[in-house]
Amino acid sequence: MILAPLSSSSLSDGLRLKKAIRMKLDTDTSTSWSGSASEPETLPVPLARTGETSRDSERANAPAKSPKPRLRKIPPGLRRRRIVFSMEPVWYKRLVWRLKEDPQFLRSAVQITFALLCVWIGIEFHLFVRWGMSDGTESFFSRPPGVEGFLPISALISLKYWMQSGIINTIHPASVFILIAILLIGLLLKKAFCGWLCPIGTISESLWMVGQRLFGRNLNVTKWLDYPLRSLKYLLLFFFVYSVWQMDVAALKYFIHSPYNKVADIKMYLFFAEISSFALWTIVVLILLSVVIKNFWCRYLCPYGALLGMASWFSPLKITRNSSTCIDCKLCTKACPADIKIHNVARVWSDECMSCLKCVEVCPVKNTLEMRTRNSSEPVPSWVLGSLVAGVFVAVTGLAMLTGNWGNEISREEYARRFQELDSPVYQHFRGEVAPYGPQD
Ligand code: SF4
Ligand code: SF4
């Protein structure tokens, strides 16, 4: 197995490096640190993996305007070596090795797996709706409970109902457990759900990568516009949470058992299947904005992202920078898709950090940038982080299945009847309130 060594860094190494740099700066006005003939070497950081474009590279190599020299070389003792995976000839060993040691490879594998799971749920739900809309002439396919992951409002209402009444609702029980799983991931692992699992996050990331390929870079939104835009998702979250907060147990129960809520998933399907031109154009505009601006939807509009951003402040794990060994190369900041100025902070508290580990991967100095808790000197390896993200989700949803709280209580006959009544006023909602309904509805 060919693995370039990553020996552990030490504080004294870092202090020696800092001292050497300071001495060099005092005696040398050049913009690079040459060091002794046997020591430094150009950084072995591939531009493609840092997200740096050739234009960025040219800019980085241009003479610095500021009096502070741009350090591009590090001593061998602190140099982080790259692993050459292609040197492993056996494909399955290479695959396992890469999953263990290459954070972005592992993250892509987890993202693709979860996206495929969502596609599978989508196909099953399509077949279920096709059966319902066909008046029973098509073959029956049971409704996949996982579709309730796309009903966040119903999940929020169901969670509050559970907390206040102690009863898990039987209409969309899976939605509550999916929401709890996502919240737990946020509380423990920052916004890792956005960076590792969320299918919308995966699509957003793919879109800005397409934009980077097409145009060489993505647009940077200026700070005076970025901050107000980022607050939009918090306003949306506040609106939803405040609306649910005001509901008492009776109102929550009335909503949960309403005909509207019982077919909320079918309504959502029909919204996209019979999409209006306004909604279609809105989606097209969002896609175009996501191509030119990194994570446009997630950063500015997703209320789930806002909720997880707030939960992430409580996470014990954070990206942590060792300032004694950091050489201020700013590669981490350049690589960060959330535009966080990592090179300036000791710990990343930002509500935008989605635990993608791109910054950790590009840092050229050993043990300088890591995902870890405040009191631990041991970093959390990427494979442990990935396992925890997937593990928490599987554990919570698995618990729902084991305890009989995954599928709902709506029978096939009831669904067949409701499919025929979908246009009835009782299945509408007005300004956030469900239409009045009786015991027979
Ligand atoms: S700080 Fe690091 S882990 Fe967080 S979003 Fe930026 S690159 Fe990803
Ligand atoms: S923490 Fe960031 S600025 Fe410091 S050495 Fe690593 S990549 Fe460079």
Image (tube, grey):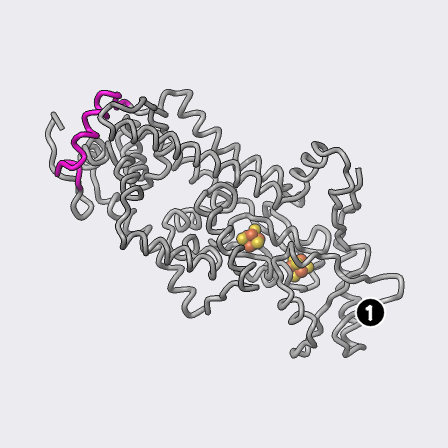
Q: Residue 355 at what x, y percent from top left? A: 54, 48
Left or right of 383 in this view: 154: left
* Whether residue 336 is situated above or below residue 166 in the rendered picture: below
Q: Quadrant of the C terminus?
A: top left
The correct choice, above or below, for 80 with respect to 397 in the image is below
Image location of residue 186, percent across then percent down: 46, 43
User: Disc 1 on helix, strand or loop?
Assistant: loop
Q: Which residues are magenta?
A: 409-428
In which quarter of the view is residue 136 placed? top left
Q: Dominant secondary structure of the magenta stretch? A: helix
User: Is the N terminus in the top left, top right, bottom left or bottom right quadrant?
Assistant: top right
- Quarter of the rendering containing residue 178: top left
Residue located 24% across and 33% down the image = 263
Q: Would residue 61 appear left or right of 24 to someone viewing this image?
A: left
Does the magenta run of residues contain 313? no
Q: Please report the residue visible at 12 percent of the width from the left and 25 percent of the height from the top.
A: 440
The residue positioned 37% from the left and 25% from the top of the image is 406
Q: Is residue 52 above or below residue 198?
A: below
Residue identified by numbered label 1: 34
**Amino acid type of the residue that numbered disc 1 sits on in the rendered structure:** Ser
